[in-house]
Amino acid sequence: MSVDASPSTVSQPADLEAVARNGSRLRRMAVRIPTYLADLKENPAWLPMFMLARTMPGRRLHWALSARYKPAQEPQPSMFGPLEASAVAEALRSDGIFTGLRMPAQIQQEIGNFARITPCFGNFDRSLEFVAPRHRDAEQRFGRSLLSGHFFERSLRSAGVRAIQADPLLMNVAKHYLGASARLITTRVWWSFPTKNATEADRSLASLDKFHFDLDDWRMLKFFFNLVDVDEGTGPHVFVKGSHNRRKIKHQYTLMVGHPADEVLDYYGADQAVTLTGPAGSGFVEDPFGFHMGTVPVTRPRLMMEVGFGVSRPSRRRFHGEPVIKR
Ligand SMILES: O=C(O)CCC(=O)C(=O)O
């Protein structure tokens, strides 16, 4: 007996794709629920921020009510050279990103050495501890793929990390961009590794392979540094220029922060996506309300550092990028 293949009874490829997409979105969201609950428990003021900071009216109002920064003194010398914080902030306002930071070679080498000899935690799990050069052995030992290796609070054992975190240029740019209430809210160092069979949950927790925006505070700024040479195969960071101050309605009034690449690039233009390859020590600063993502390395591991600024009391877990602090 033949069955009438009418559109109402048989799924078309487009429907199947939509179902698969929704399933993947929900799985990505579900993996973050424990983190969201931890944020709410630590600071109930997180909830209104989480609901409203994704909307353009909510953000604009918060921005309009914030205290402007009026620099009272000459900027202190910076390891990044004579960059004008106000010019960096201006580029951030127009593009959402400023590229072209370069840390001194000895600082980059110190952090690189630290990250090769200090054990990191695989896939954000403190029970999966290994040193980066033994990544393959660790995957065999733990019987699972290890996509990322975070140092959490150990990051601050590195003198180079502490020096970058304290560099006056960073706070100066943050104040020029975010206003007088800018404060340090994250410092983290992590590896991302080429690996087979990384799960969707692991990729979601590591913010890899999916354009998303960050909603950890009303307004934020993140400095990122490539600590190894990063090319197309090393899992570079990607940022969509201009996406920090313009947002499709569909992407404002939804709980999802991650959205499919075609939706994002169709709206902002594929030519607005900047891939942040660069030599070891190169860095950039972005407004992470703009769409961005890391990508999964395919050839060599990537070592990355982030120093983030916000305008609210820093969360204990977010400071070193730990999804939920169990201790
Ligand atoms: O690993 C990366 O380059 C992306 C990091 C990221 O998306 C984030 O910190 O929000």
Image (spheres, rainbow, N blue to C red):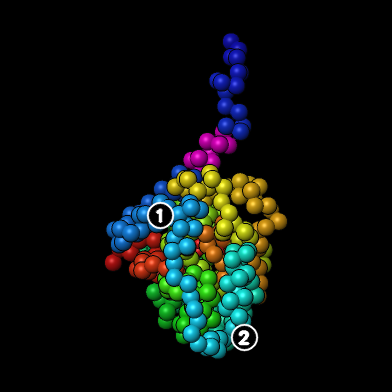
**Residue 85, image x and y in percent?**
57, 78
Amino acid type for the residue under numbered disc 2? Pro
Answer left or right for 98 relative to 123.
right
- Ligand 1 closer than 8 Å to the CB at disc 1? no
- The quarter of the rendered structure image containing the N terminus is top right
Residue 24 place in picture, x, y as percent: 50, 44
- Which of the 4 quarters of the picture holds residue 120? bottom left
**Which residue is found at the position 69% from the left and 53% from the top?**
270
List the residue tagged with mark 2: 82
Residue most extreme to the top: 1
In terms of depth relative to the viewer, which is nearer, 154 or 219? Answer: 219
Please check the rendered image and state whether residue 261 is part of the magenta-colored stretch, yes or no.
no
Q: Which mark is residue 50?
A: 1
Disc 1 to disc 2, how far (Cα)? Answer: 37 Å
From where the camera sits, is residue 187 visible? no
The 10 Å Cα crowd at callout 2, few under 14, some 14 to 19, many 20 or more, is few
Q: Position of residue 162 (x, y in %)?
A: 46, 82
Instruction: From the viewer's perspective, tell me whether residue 31 is left or right of residue 22.
Output: left
Instruction: Give the left or right position of residue 85, taking residue 327 as reference.
Output: right
Residues drawn in magenta: 16-24
Q: Residue at x 53, y 62 (%)?
A: 288
Element under disc 2: loop
Characterize the magenta stretch by its predominant secondary structure.
Answer: helix
Badge 1 amino acid? Phe
Residue 229 placement: quadrant: bottom right
